[in-house]
Amino acid sequence: MNHFDSRNGALCAEDVPLEKIAHEVGTPTYVYSSATLNRHLSVVRDAFGTVPHVLCYSVKANSTLGVLKLVVKHGSGFDIVSGGELARVLEAGGDPKRIVFSGVGKREDEMVAALRAGILMFNVESAEELALLDRVGRRAKKKAPFSLRVNPDVDPRTHKYIATGLKSSKFGVPFEEAVALYRASRKMKGLQAMGVDCHIGSQLTDAKPFAQALSRVAGLYTTLKAEGFPLTHLDVGGGLGVTYTDEKPPGLAAYSQVVVDSTRHTGATVVLEPGRVIVANAGVLITRVLFNKKTKTKHFLIVDAGMNDLMRPALYEAHHDIVAVKPRRGAKTTVEIVGPVCESTDVLGKARSVPPLVAGDLLAIKTAGAYGMSMASTYNSRPRPAEVLVDGKRWRVIRKREALQDLWRGETP
Ligand SMILES: *Cc1c(COP(=O)(O)O)cnc(C)c1O
């Protein structure tokens, strides 16, 4: 469900024609729908309405302040993976008591900042990280609240680059070693065990791996409780997939049923870390056609957005539907939609059937709200896109297009 629909033959974000935004802000530009974002946050919250839970939106999916502010207003919390994300959340007015800090490579200064801010808990991924967090806690004369991220060794059946819960993955503590580490933490005075955590991957379209992982993790939680650990939180991670083209991920009702069924007997407060499912469908990337270029074998449609603006196709072979904002009449042709970046992987859409398009026409790359702008770079010295947030008839720029001078800020010739 999203709020990007055609009206009188022109694609709109809520009540605002995308053409109008492109005219005033230029292209490429990310456009988000507040109604879609709010709806997704509410649907997640309501799906877990029957159990105690904390909704911690995964900041790395889209970390723009205007988006974070909307999450704050909704009353939700945050899952962060760096000191930079912590700073962004605090800047947006986020409640530190609803922040969980994940990631395999936290630096000491990042731990100190998060402990000082008073976050809900650290999700720790190795024995050495646990020892460092203990030292940070002792030095601050505090007990750093932590969960171990355990690796349940299940195959999430997603793209290999976004599977994180396999034995071979860098993420999490091997399941067999978790109990010993919790026991060892008893002697560490700078720590307080608070829960158990897992996150098995992203863009999951099957509920089974969730059920398998959660039953293992809930079992560990129960074992630890029986040993006297005062645990209160069970973090089930994120990872619920969305529909980019014809995927059929479980709906939120089905997903919450799996989570609740696997964890209710523990009595724990469930921590949720959804990212993609909140923002992916809430955003599009609008781009203009630069050229049609026909070779003997292919018809390329060259547009002004590239892999630096939206990296997912190049990085994960990801598919995004791409549509004309104002389709012209005429026979459809099959084209390769490519960006200007000097890399052969700069292909936004392979073998797409499109209506006739000429230079200056606008396209919308759909389902681009998650892992779009947050992964954008300035490769080829291309300023990063502007971002716009639409709310009904109103809209505002929540990030200006990068200026050329921004490209070399901090550099010394
Ligand atoms: C990326 C990530 C998430 C969010 O994943 P989605 O697939 O966007 O829901 C949640 N938790 C952790 C630890 C992550 O790394």
Image (cartoon, rainbow, N blue to C red):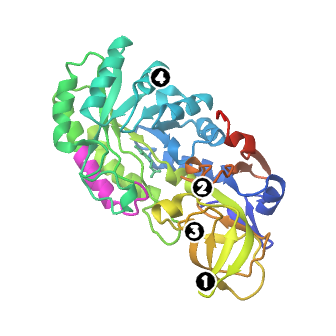
Mark number for residue 347? 3
Whichever of labels 1 and 3 marks the residue nearer the N terminus, that label is 1
Label 4 – label 2 distance at C-alpha: 31 Å
Residue 264 falls left or right of residue 10: left
Label 1 – label 4 distance at C-alpha: 53 Å
Span shown in magenta: 202-217
The residue identified by callout 1 is 298
Q: Are marks 1 and 4 in contact (CB under 8 Å)?
A: no
Q: Are marks 2 and 1 in contact (CB under 8 Å)?
A: no
The residue identified by callout 4 is 113
Q: Position of residue 99 (x, y in %)?
A: 47, 32
Q: Quadrant of the C terminus?
A: top right
The residue identified by callout 2 is 308
Q: Quadrant of residue 13?
A: bottom right
Residue occupying the point 26% across, 25% down: 230
The kind of residue on which mark 3 rests is: Val
Label 1 – label 3 distance at C-alpha: 13 Å
Whichever of labels 4 and 2 marks the residue nearer the N terminus, that label is 4
Q: Are marks 1 and 3 in contact (CB under 8 Å)?
A: no
Q: Is residue 307 above or below residue 102?
A: below
Nearer the observer, 98 or 114: 114
